[in-house]
Image (cartoon, grey):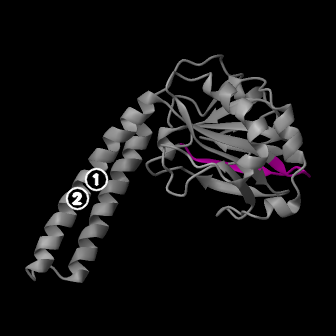
């Protein structure tokens, strides 16, 4: 989601020792089960759905193994948000030695509507996360939120792989905004679909013209979404002010 800063610190020390110990026990074979589109990160989903739904996230196989140690962390996270908030996604992400993730912006109808939180579990000096042109090193045990609608990327110049627990939190206010925008998004699609179906049945619309019409509509929707994501400014009160970014040494992150 978008807020005034590039980063926001939610907690300086999350009780995560038990989770960290279990993560350190994972083997390379465990991590090889999933490789992200970025190509240099590996993701093990804990709570995740391919359709990025916000209701009833599905526990994955890893939840059976880590559930007892990850749930206390989940509860710690949710305690910092308003009543009715929920975790819609949770995953372990490992950035390989020497790996990097190019600058990009998160889009769609899930990512701009959640608090994307990073908890470094295994980190070393030499991993730099950059959001909106500001670079930051995150220490193990800290809980950070990134402004994921700003351009962001990661570089790992350390000699160690870096592991983060990434948690996406939805609040009642964010869900209200998301629901409103989903309605606004689907209305033009429905109108075009109904009109195009009728025209095709009447022989007035060819397949080529239909594709051109849909491409034009998608372009308009994409431009609207980009403008909207930059305007969104929902930001709850911060539990504590973040330290000056410039005063932090690089200490690990992954997207």
**Label 2 sits on residue:** 190
Distance Cα–Cα, label 2 vs label 1: 6 Å
Q: Residues within 10 Å of mark 1 (few under 14, many from 20)?
A: few
User: In which quadrant of the rendered view does residue 237 lie?
Assistant: top right
User: In which quadrant of the rendered view does residue 42 lie?
Assistant: bottom right
Observer able to see residue 232: no
Q: Is residue 193 left or right of residue 71?
A: left
The disc label shown at residue 186, or none:
1
Q: Residue at x 31, y 39 (%)?
A: 180
SS label for mark 2: helix
Residue span colored magenta = 150-162
Observer able to see residue 148: yes
User: 124 above or below 84?
Assistant: below
SS label for mark 1: helix
Q: Residue at x 39, y 40 (%)?
A: 178
Q: Are marks 2 and 1 in contact (CB under 8 Å)?
A: yes
Q: Is residue 57 left or right of residue 18?
A: left
């Amino acid at each position: 989601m978008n807020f005034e800063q590039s980063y926001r610190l939610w907690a300086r020390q999350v009780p995560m020792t038990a989770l960290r110990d279990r993560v350190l026990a994972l083997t390379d074979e465990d991590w090889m089960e999933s490789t992200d589109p970025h190509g240099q990160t590996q993701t093990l989903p804990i709570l995740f759905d391919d359709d990025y739904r916000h209701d009833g996230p599905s526990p994955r196989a890893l939840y059976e193994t880590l559930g007892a140690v990850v749930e206390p962390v989940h509860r710690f996270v949710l305690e910092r948000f308003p009543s009715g908030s929920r975790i819609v996604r949770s995953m372990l992400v490992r950035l390989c030695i020497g790996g990097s993730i190019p600058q990009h912006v998160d889009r769609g109808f899930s990512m701009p509507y959640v608090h994307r939180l990073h908890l470094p579990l295994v980190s070393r000096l030499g991993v730099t996360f950059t959001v909106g042109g500001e670079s930051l090193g995150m220490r193990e045990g800290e809980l950070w939120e990134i402004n994921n609608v700003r351009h962001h990327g990661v570089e790992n110049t350390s000699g160690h792989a870096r592991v983060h627990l990434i948690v996406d939190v939805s609040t009642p206010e964010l869900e209200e905004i998301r629901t409103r925008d989903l309605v606004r998004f689907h209305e033009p699609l429905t109108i075009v679909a109904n009109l195009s179906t009728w025209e095709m049945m009447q022989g007035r619309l060819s397949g080529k013209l239909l594709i051109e019409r849909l491409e034009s509509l998608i372009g308009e929707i994409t431009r609207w979404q980009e403008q909207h994501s930059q305007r969104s400014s929902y930001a709850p009160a911060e539990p504590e002010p973040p330290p000056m970014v410039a005063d932090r040494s690089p200490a690990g992150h992954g997207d």
